[in-house]
Every structure is written in C-alpha cells, then in structure tokens.
Image (cartoon, rainbow, N blue to C red):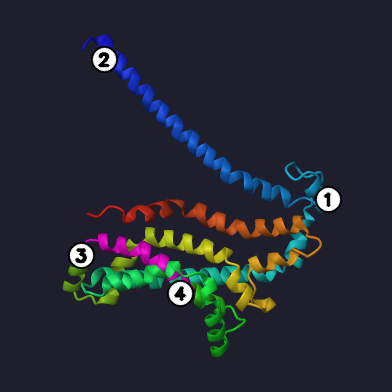
Amino acid sequence: MTGYAIEAHLSKRRFKVRAAAAGRHLLLASASVFVLVPIVYMVLASFKSVPDFFSNPYGLPSKWMWENYTRAWNEAKIAITLPNSIIVTATSVLGSSFLSALISYGLSRREKPFVTGLYLLFVGGMLVPAQMIVIPLFILLRAVGLFGTLFALIFPYIALGLPLGVLVLTPIVATLPRELSDAARVDGANEWQIFWRIILPLLRPGLASVSILNGVWMWNEFFIPLVVAFKAQSQTMPVGIVSFIGTYSTEWGLVFASVVVSTAPAIVAYLLMTQQFVAGLTAGAIKG
C-alpha cells in the first residue's frame, strides 16, 4: 500500500471517528434541550400572573411576580408539607436501602434452592401498583392506629422501595469476592460484622443509585398521601400543590412556584450524587 493510500485511509478513518463523535454530541445536546426546556418553562411560569400566563405562555413575564413564592409558601402550606416530604422521603429511603442491602446480602451469599424464587418474589413486587394495595393498606393502618400520620407513608414507602433495591443490589453483592467474607470469618467476625464493615461500604455506589431512584419516586408520589395522609399536618408537597387547582379557576403562577420549590431538592440531590448513580448502575454489569 502506497503512502498516499495509507494517508487516505487514515483520513477517512479520522472523518468517521469525528462524525461519530459529532453525532453523539448532537444526540446528547438534543436530549439536554428536551429536558431543560420544560424546566425553564416551569421557572418562567412561576413568576407570571394568571392573565400573563394565558396571554404569553411561552415568553418572559411582563411583570416578575416574586410574591408568587411568598403566597405559595403560605397558602400551599409549604412550611408544613416541605418538612413532611423531607422527613418521609429521607426516612423511607434510608429504611428501604438498608433493608434492601441486608436482603441482597442474604440472597447472594446463601446457596439454597429457594433463593432464586425468593429473589423473583421480591423483584415481582415492582409489578404491583400502589392502587391495588390501597384498600388493605387503609384497613391495616387504621387498625394499628397509624392512619393520618407520617408513619402511614413511611412504612408503605419502605416496603414499596424494596423490590427495586433488591433488583439493583443483589447482582452487585454477587460480584464481590467471597474471599473478603471468608477472611473476616477466619478473623472471628460474625455475619453482622461482615455485612456492616465489609459489604455495606462496598455497596455505596449501588446504594446511591437505589436512593436516587426510590427517592425521586417517593418525593413525587401523590396517590398514597392523598388517601392515608388526610390531616393537614401530615400532607406532603404533591398533595399541597393540588390545593391551588380549583374547579373554575387555577392560580397557575402559584402552582408552578410550588412545583419549583418541590423540584429543587430532587435536582440538587441528583447533581450531588451523579457519579455514584452512574457507578451504581454499572457496578453489577460485569462479573469478575
């Protein structure tokens, strides 16, 4: 092959590499625009009055209504619903993530014939919608005296978060070298010490992924709080935001201001845990 042919081949290969890179960047930019446009629209709408919202829905506010946030804080009872959402989400995420790690450790380290069936049973819980369990949940919570309290949300959320946690964490635990556990047993460690001091620290990326996925769902979940958290002091933000939506008129500026306040913690949490989230999703993909 002559020098000219080699140069032409290399030039063609470089063109393909650059074209592929440009295509990937274009795809990612399009996806970013697809995600960012609704967020920008939501923020701009939160500063508009009702007439301005309908007369100029996609433009800048003719007058920046900063008082929308003050009214949303007071009239939507964000001072109550925001702490409730934080308490419920944080407690439920911690509880479901910790229990998922315990269950995943047990399923991946025990050579029993029923392990596969038990794993499928846990994962199958993802197919059960909350609407199917709301009636027995209602009866159970009323029977134990938790109806209308924050615990009426925390315990169901922990249970509903287990299937995803087990699905993500079990393959990750299975890839961890068993020599670590065996060495700890030789040194006299019991199963709890092995889990707490060895397994759990190695599961941090997976736990971050499970926490984000479950946390976003729990933060935005509307149906269960609407049914079981009927008291004003136990409502979460999604239920509080609905108070602005009326039969004949809706204060859309206040609705979007409340949504901005509700969305901000989830976005900040995701940005702070992005690396752990990506690492957790790929941690159990390759064994060995």
The image quadrant that residue 236 belongs to is: bottom right
Question: In the image, what residue type sits under mark 3?
Answer: Arg
How many circles with numbers are drawn on the protein? 4
Q: CA distance from mark 2 to mark 4?
A: 62 Å
224 or 190: nearer the viewer:
224
Asked whether 273 falls inside the magenta stretch, the response is no
- Callout 1 crowding tier (Cα within 10 Å): few <14, some 14–19, many ≥20: few
Query: What number is the disc on residue 6?
Result: 2
Question: Which of pointers 2 and 3 indicates the residue nearer the eye?
Answer: 2
Residue behind mark 3? 178
Give the foreground label among 3 and 1.
Answer: 1
| Badge 3 element | helix
Near mark 3 (Cα within 10 A), the count class, few <14, some 14-19 or many ≥20, is: few
Q: State the residue position of label 1.
A: 51
Q: Amino acid at mark 1?
A: Pro
Magenta part, dominant SS = helix
Q: Quadrant of the N terminus?
A: top left
Residue placed most toward the observer, 258 or 273:
258
Closer to the camera in the image, 224 or 75: 224
